Image (cartoon, grey):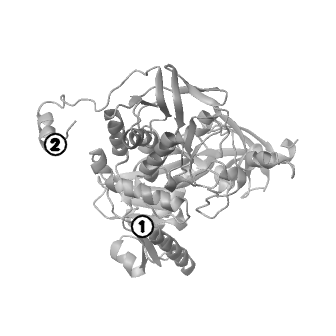
Amino acid sequence: MGYSALKIFKEGLFGQKGWKPVWRNPEPKPEYDVIIIGGGGHGLSTAYYLAKAHGITNVAVLEKGYLGGGNVGRNTTIVRANYLLPGNSEFYSHSLKLWEGMEQDLNYNTMMSQRGIINLFHSDGQRDAFARRGNAMINQGDDAILLDRDGVKDMLPMIDYDNVRFPIYGGLYHPRGGTARHDAVAWGYARGADQRGVDLIQNCEVTGIDIEGGVVRGVQTSRGAIRAKKVAIVVAGRSGQVAAMAGMRLPIESHVLQAFVTEGVKPILDNVVSFGMGHFYISQSDKGGLVFGGDLDFYASYAARGNLPMAEHVTDAAMTLMPSIGKARVLRSWGGIMDMSSDGSPIIDKTQTDGLYLNCGWCYGGFKAVPGSGFSYAHLIAKDVHHEPASKFRLDRFRTGRGLMDEEGTGSQHNLH
Amino acid sequence: MRLPCPLCGERDRREFYYQGHATMLDRPARDAGIDAWDDYLHNRDNIAGEVEDLWHHEAGCGAWIKVTRNTVTHEVSGAKLVNGARK
């Protein structure tokens, strides 16, 4: 379907009755080449790249609710490639390149806005750590600029530079980072997959995974049994439950992460800003709302809503960094269920069952990975070989201890990420 | 969320440090093998529903407690001291 100013104008005159659904609503077929469990950002992009890059179109995406109703609709829309460790660095670098070509590729406006990300620092030691991170980003071929205090001041006039505990020493600026319209990303991939013949099946909950002699045969669902040659799990916070259907226990704990948005205000913040010492980050949406968040509530949860102590902590940090926004009223707050791996890095791998694949462990960073994760997962499913940029996201690194990617340097332990 | 410390009574969640699922109490033997240690350190049942997890009353009496809590509703239905809870 084409969107144009003329079409919008005409629909405005005639009660918006001429729009048609942009994807089909098919009944499940008895058998597919590939079944993808989970119709979120990662599942939909996996389906899209299976069809587009590998010509595999006899594919179903099974979604227990509605498309894009999980974390892809609940995040704070930040896109970046500012990782330090080999394994993560090349993956997010690849993903950012896909973001940059996404609108042309999908012919869909995902409102990709490379407004730049600034990570603030407050001491000489932290400056050294950010200089090191910036060098790692440049070595990877991405962009990083170390700003001093005046450099940050030119860009962010609205923050408090002389907080007694956290004076601003400077910031690490990542110009190609930014934000994108999260729902549009899911819809763009959904439309692209549907156009190529993928069946997007909503209200279809997977209740079992059929395995015979170590080989996957299909799935049981709330809409009947469906056979498949390959089954790919990509269900974020619900990874533990779905993997259990295949007899697996994962190195994953599901935690709740909250986010907040204020009423719309005039433009005061051009970039995405992170205040790591306060566990706080903020950006301003195109509608003017200040979108911000903090750290996990730090207890296992599937509630998709948090508790007040973390809301208080996050708003404390907001007032420390930007006292000027103190009178902005918070319109909404919400929580998403994060699939926290014990080293804080993701998993894209085969499993002990032939034909069963696993994609999870995105922690609180899944949104920026949507295109890269789908691309690399589709590559693994189609060719049974790891895609090079995602080749270190192995499931067995926890068991062996080799190749753990502890990006925060806190230790590979569940309660520390 | 308030947690019922057996020594102090109901206290605010902010007084407690969260350690994780109570499987952390079942430490394997030194020679139990790589799979047992992998299960202990990393792998979790990750239940949506009633779970038992470990909290440290660090800003209170200092006790380690085992809390019975629902991960879907955040309802807390009980807590006991780890020393008493341990087999």
Residue A64 appears in the rendering: no
Count of marks placed on residues = 2
Relative to residue A123, is residue A75 drawn left or right?
A: left
Which residue is rendered at x = 67% and y = 60% of the image? A411
Mark 1 — residue?
A142
> Disc 2 is attached to a residue of which chain?
A
Q: Earlier in the sequence, mark 2 or mark 1?
A: 2
Q: Residues within 10 Å of mark 1 (few under 14, many from 20)?
A: many
Q: Amino acid at mark 1?
A: Asp
Residue A125 percent across, percent down from the top left: 57, 78
Instruction: Out of A398 and A332, give the one closest to the viewer.
Output: A398
Disc number placed over residue A98 in the picture, else none: none
Q: Quadrant of residue A209?
A: top right
Q: Amino acid at mark 2?
A: Ser
Which residue is rendered at x = 33% and y = 61% of the image? A114
Relative to residue B87, is residue B36 drawn left or right?
A: left
Which residue is rendered at x = 44% and y = 53% of the image? A368
Disc number placed over residue A4 in the picture, else none: 2
Instruction: Out of A39 and A410, give the one closest to the viewer.
Output: A39
Instruction: Out of A380 and B10, give the one closest to the viewer.
Output: A380
Image quadrant containing the C terminus of chain A: bottom right
Residue A106 percent across, percent down from the top left: 30, 45
Which residue is rendered at x = 33% and y = 39% of the image? A192
- In what element is the residue under mark 1? loop
